[in-house]
Amino acid sequence: MAGLTISRFAAAAGVGVETVRFYQRRGLLAVPERQGPGYREYSEADQRRLAFICRARELGFTLSEIGDLLSPAETGFTDDILQAARAKLDQVQKQFTELALLRCRLRQLVRVCEDGDGADCLALRLGQPAQAAGMP
């Protein structure tokens, strides 16, 4: 499947042409030389690189992080990828913990607003900083 034009290359990866161009501008994908009739043709190596980028994005890696991982991915140096995956997992776990705490606080607010006298619900003092409203 080598020698794909940009539209077929993008479609094969399930992304748009503008996504491919965006990755090129960011330096994640090379812009191939024009071949034969003046079209740029993408190789199997380009396809593997784009597939790696797409999988890494699905796993929550930023474009900057992906840029750092491309070289180790292409050379087979898995220690760097393992370290990055562990760091991303730690970050996700921290976000999960923060979201769980936020969920508990919101559930409590819903109960107060549903069951309280209204003044308790309004204790949020919308539009005022939390400290100015006497809240921690």
Image: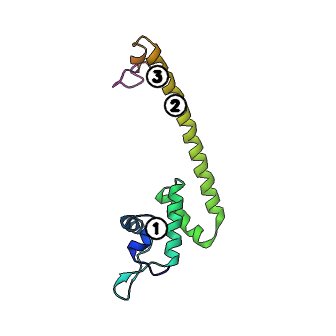
Tell whether 125 sits left or right of 46: left
Farthest-out residue, top:
117
Residue at point 59%, 68% (across, down): 73
Judge by depth and name the residue closer to the eye, 96 or 71. Answer: 96
Q: Quadrant of residue 23?
A: bottom left
Q: Secondary structure at mark 1?
A: loop
Magenta span: chief secondary structure: loop
Neighbor class of circle 1 (other Cα within 10 Å; few <14, some 14-19, many 20+) is: many
The magenta-colored residue range is: 124-133
Judge by depth and name the residue closer to the eye, 82 or 20. Answer: 20
Find residue 12 and report its horizontal and vertical position in percent: 46, 70
Amino acid type shown at disc 3: Val
Neighbor class of circle 3 (other Cα within 10 Å; few <14, some 14-19, many 20+) is: few
Find residue 61 and report its horizontal and vertical position in percent: 52, 55
Query: Label 2 belongs to which residue?
Result: 103
Q: From what the image shows, is residue 72 above or below residue 104?
A: below
Query: Label 1 belongs to which residue?
Result: 28
Residue at point 58%, 37% (across, down): 97
Say if residue 29 shows up in the picture.
Answer: yes
Alpha carbon distance from label 1 to label 2:
37 Å
Q: Give the number of the disc on residue 110.
A: 3
Q: Earlier in the sequence, mark 2 or mark 3?
A: 2
Amino acid type shown at disc 1: Leu
Q: Secondary structure at mark 2?
A: helix
Question: Is the C-beta separation of discs 1 and 2 under 8 Å?
Answer: no
